[in-house]
Image (cartoon, rainbow, N blue to C red):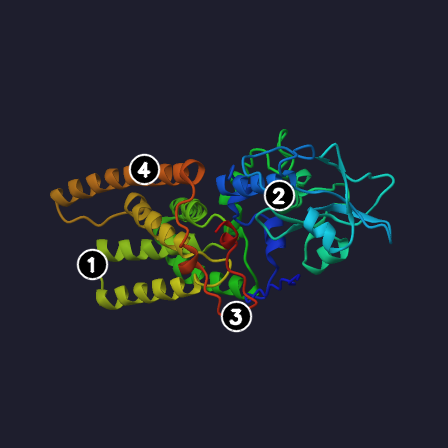
Amino acid sequence: TLSRPSETNMWIGLKSNFLLLYGAKFAPCMRTDNQINRLLAKKRDEECGFSPTVCKLGGYAQGQGVSCCKISGNGRAGMTTNATCASVAGTWQQSNNQNVMCNSVTDNIVLRPCCIGFVGQCSLMTSDQCFYVNGTTHPEAQLCSEVNCFSGICTMNPTGVTVNSDSTYANQPANPNQWWRFITPLFLHAGVLHYVVCGVVQYNLGRPIEKAIGWVRMVLLYFISGIGGYVVNAAFSPYTIDVGASPALFGLLAVTLAELVQSWQIVSRPLAQLGKVCVGVIVGMLLGTLPYLDNVGHVAGFIFGFFCSIVFLPYITFGKWDVYRKFVLVIASLLVLVALITTAFIFFYFVQDLCAGCSKINCVQYNPSVSCSSESIFS
């Protein structure tokens, strides 16, 4: 039984596939992903079985695999398992006890690979079935092991840059390295409401900070917090599609907090100001449970922003000892920033598989039509 997926963008904006076209964060387009490659190897072996004449083995071989099934009554054909072929009263073709491909010239092949979703899922089905499940059919191929689903998922508009197929395994992406997806999400929004929220927050937080520290320091704070947030986001929530400047905005919240702490002695009603920052953090974290936003990125952006503020903000000092103390604090914070970003990149590219349960704090399915995560396919 086929189920037709539906996606509602509560932010009043584009759907996930369009956000990906313009640079949304999505880790499988940015690195060679271990879980994705295991999934694709399993698919290859499900089609190969113990007669690997139609594709290449990857260590997961099970059953007889697929071979050409022909239905004599209507002349239709397609690659299926023996059991599926028998269920439609077809004839499962073999040659010398080996699985065989259908003849693309003489056979009326109706089953083609259909790419579904965003993490390389593929099934053999008719073009009508593929259309029904919002998939992408590949009439040029007969097997999912011949199709690189990520070539469509990771295409960037308007450049057309994509992820090519591996030279050994056609269904596996070859060295995905779209590093710019750490940056481009900062300039994207999930929809009209998201744009309005980010604009209001950025105006009210960013304008006074920029006036106080200048545009150069503001740019450094904004992008270090934003990019750092997305690196950590991608490491801990690799299969969510995320956009927006919220990691950078959490960095600005951290700047506000750091400035308050540094000037506590001279600020009027510091506890009230601290309460405003706490309310901003709480509201931001609640918004982070909605699609296309990520609470891991929010927390990371806040941390990067806090240490950036220590490094870049001008200080009010009270005596010689205070000058020395703050100089040491700046150097230590700079070293922490370098260590944090280095560790985040190492986790993203080399460690992987970090937090299977992170999706529980990143997206809450308030409505059945809200799609939160693709991680369930790996369980």
Disc 2 residue type? Phe
Sequence-wise, which precedes: disc 4 or disc 2? 2
**Can residue 251 be seen here?**
yes
Q: Give the residue number, with chain letter if any, for mark 4.
A: 339
**Contact flag, marks 4 and 1 (Cβ < 8 Å):** no
Mark 4: few/some/many CA within 10 Å (<14, 14-19, 20+): few
| Disc number for residue 367 | 3
How far apart in space, not on screen, are marks 3 and 1 (Cα)?
43 Å
Q: Give the residue number, with chain letter if any, for mark 2.
A: 150
Where in the figure is residue 262, as x and y percent of width and height?
22, 53
Q: Could you tell me which secondary element the residue under label 4 belongs to?
A: helix
Sequence-wise, which precedes: disc 4 or disc 1? 1
Disc 1 residue type? Trp
Q: Give the residue number, with chain letter if any, for mark 1.
A: 264
Residue at image position (77%, 41%) is 93
Where in the figure is residue 13, as x and y percent of width and height?
60, 62
Sequence-wise, which precedes: disc 2 or disc 3? 2
Please tell me which residue lies in front, 132 or 318.
132
